């Protein structure tokens, strides 16, 4: 198949697996997208243009890869299952714009993939049990990324977009919203995959910010404070921060007061901007200590 081939001729996931003597690996949580209309909607949400550079995470059997390639973009198709790499290579024997890479999305170096070029676009159907570490790797490399459109479990999509005072609001919500604009694009039913997962999926779009939503002072200190605050959700902010030892215990009450946060409040009530204030002021305490 060439870059602009007719992907309607691409066999179903079942047929491709069978033809290569393979099966979906349950232990890896593999579910291959079989509905071409879903692939089309993912590409539309990503808005690629000719000449863009797209990193596809979890390229699998290539059904989304083919649709991405039609945009005229250059594709790096990342797949950690080495049994699937020959399948992907076989789909694009004459396409210089598609490069297949056997790698783990959790540790992928997006800075290296970008090089001196423009910021990257990211697309993919993420394995549900690895979604969180992959998302944190994206956030770590945010300066090299323009936007990402990814399939995740619906529960994770809700956490990404959640607001304070919601049960789903947590570390992932705060960290992701600090560094990107989050939008849930559409839901995908289990029947769109082979094999069918037991949960509904959602496609989310992350537009990475040029700078943080609110100045956190030190991004690493911000990360530690947010993680510590949510580590024991039932504890008050004062007690949670005492347990983290991010700042001296005897400074915590003053720190919260200066940040405009009630000591008896809990982490799920604090906005992203509130955590940023907390981090900025905590940085001052660190410097003075």
Image (cartoon, rainbow, N blue to C red):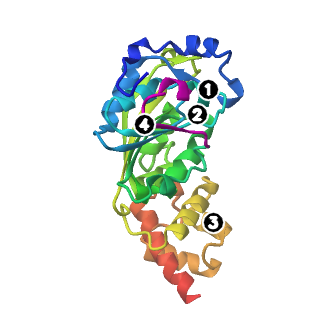
Q: Secondary structure at mark 3?
A: helix
Categorize mark 4 by other alpha carbons within 10 Å: few (<14), some (14-19), many (20+).
few
Categorize mark 2 by other alpha carbons within 10 Å: few (<14), some (14-19), many (20+).
some
Query: Nearer the N terminus, badge 2 or badge 4?
Result: 4
Query: What's the CA distance linking mark 2 and mark 4?
Result: 27 Å
User: Seen from this angle, which residue lies furthest front?
Assistant: 94
Q: Quadrant of residue 30?
A: top right
User: Is the residue under label 3 in contact with that under label 4 (CB below 8 Å)?
Assistant: no
Residue 65 at least partly seen: yes
Categorize mark 1 by other alpha carbons within 10 Å: few (<14), some (14-19), many (20+).
many
Q: Tell whether position 217 is magenta.
A: no
Would you name the residue on which mark 3 appears? Answer: 239
Q: Does residue 199 appear to the left or right of 73 in the view shown? A: right
User: Is the residue under label 3 in contact with that under label 1 (CB below 8 Å)?
Assistant: no
Q: Residue visible at 28% across and 39% down?
A: 50
Query: What's the CA distance linking mark 1 and mark 4?
Result: 27 Å
User: Seen from this angle, which residue lies furthest right?
Assistant: 27
User: Is the residue under label 2 in contact with that under label 1 (CB below 8 Å)?
Assistant: yes
Of marks 4 and 3, the one in the foreground: 4
Would you name the residue on which mark 1 appears? Answer: 30
Of marks 1 and 4, the one in the foreground: 4
Would you name the residue on which mark 4 appears? Answer: 96
User: Is the residue under label 4 in contact with that under label 2 (CB below 8 Å)?
Assistant: no
Query: What's the CA distance linking mark 1 and mark 2?
Result: 7 Å
């Amino acid at each position: 198949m060439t870059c602009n081939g007719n992907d309607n001729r691409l066999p179903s996931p079942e047929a491709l697996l069978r033809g290569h003597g393979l099966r979906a690996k349950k232990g890896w949580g593999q579910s291959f997208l079989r509905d071409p209309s879903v692939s089309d909607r993912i590409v539309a949400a990503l808005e690629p243009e000719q000449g863009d550079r797209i990193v596809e995470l979890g390229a699998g059997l290539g059904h989304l890869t083919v649709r991405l390639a039609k945009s005229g973009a250059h594709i790096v198709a990342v797949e950690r299952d080495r049994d699937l790499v020959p399948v992907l290579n076989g789909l694009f024997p004459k396409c210089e714009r598609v490069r297949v890479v056997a790698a783990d999305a959790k540790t992928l170096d997006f800075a290296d993939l970008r090089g001196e070029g423009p910021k990257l676009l990211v697309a993919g159907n993420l394995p549900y049990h690895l979604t969180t570490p992959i998302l944190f790797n994206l956030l770590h490399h945010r300066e090299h990324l323009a936007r990402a459109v990814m399939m995740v479990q619906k529960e994770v999509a809700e956490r990404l977009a959640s607001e304070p005072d919601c049960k789903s609001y947590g570390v992932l919500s705060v960290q992701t919203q600090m560094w990107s604009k989050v939008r849930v694009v559409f839901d995908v039913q289990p029947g769109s995959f082979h094999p069918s997962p037991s949960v509904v999926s959602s496609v989310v779009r992350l537009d990475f910010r040029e700078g943080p939503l609110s100045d956190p002072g030190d991004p690493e200190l911000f990360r530690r404070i947010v993680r510590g605050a949510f580590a024991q959700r039932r504890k008050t902010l004062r007690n949670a921060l005492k347990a983290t030892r991010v700042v001296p215990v005897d400074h915590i009450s003053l720190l919260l007061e200066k940040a405009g946060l009630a000591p008896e409040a809990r982490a799920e009530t604090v906005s992203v901007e509130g955590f940023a204030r907390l981090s900025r002021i905590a940085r001052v305490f660190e410097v003075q200590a």
